[in-house]
């Protein structure tokens, strides 16, 4: 059985590296991207169960990334940001700096939904 896959997208290298290490230690297969464009190139090949993406990024933001992936290829999406969620956003939202317990619980729940 394949381990659940998490794709982390954040333009902050330190954040990506820390999240990769944390989630890999939790037992998930992890890939990272520094931009939405890079993530779009990885989605089909990596086939993530969960997309963990920063909301605010240059050129294409997290919402636009989730929309660009589309429903056919859509992993579960978790947004993270130091900013509050926009009105009406229904997908999981984690405030930066991230609470590790909340992050692991949220991703664990979404992985279970996909199983």
Image (cartoon, rainbow, N blue to C red):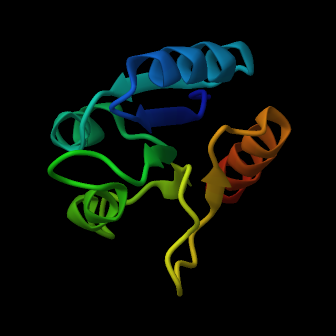
The residue that appears at 56% across and 28% down in the rendered structure is 2
Q: Nearer the viewer, residue 8 or 45?
A: 8
Q: Quadrant of residue 36?
A: top left
Q: Residue at x 60, y 27 (%)?
A: 3
Residue plotted at (57% across, 70% down): 91
Image coordinates of residue 45 in percent, x first then y, are: 25, 32
Give the quadrant of the N terminus. Answer: top right
Question: Does 85 sit left or right of 71 as displayed?
Answer: right
> Residue 22: where, in percent of width, then height?
67, 18
Q: Is residue 89 above or below residue 108?
A: below
Counting from the top left corner in percent of width and height, residue 72 is at 30, 66
Q: Is residue 104 above or below residue 94?
A: above
The outermost residue toward the front is 83
- Residue at point 66%, 38% (across, down): 97
15 left or right of 61?
right
Residue 65 appears in which quarter of the rendering? bottom left
Query: Which residue is nearer to you in this view: 81 or 108?
Result: 81
């Amino acid at each position: 059985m394949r381990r659940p896959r998490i794709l982390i997208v954040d333009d902050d290298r330190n954040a990506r590296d820390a999240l990769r290490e944390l989630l890999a230690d939790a037992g998930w297969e992890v890939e990272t991207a520094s931009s939405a464009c890079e993530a779009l190139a990885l989605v089909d090949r990596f086939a993530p169960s969960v997309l963990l993406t920063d909301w605010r990024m240059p050129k294409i933001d997290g919402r636009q990334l989730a929309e660009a992936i589309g429903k056919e290829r859509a992993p579960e999406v978790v947004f993270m940001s130091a900013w509050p969620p926009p009105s009406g956003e229904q997908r999981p939202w984690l405030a930066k700096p991230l609470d590790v317990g909340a992050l692991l619980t949220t991703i664990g729940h979404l992985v279970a939904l996909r199983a």
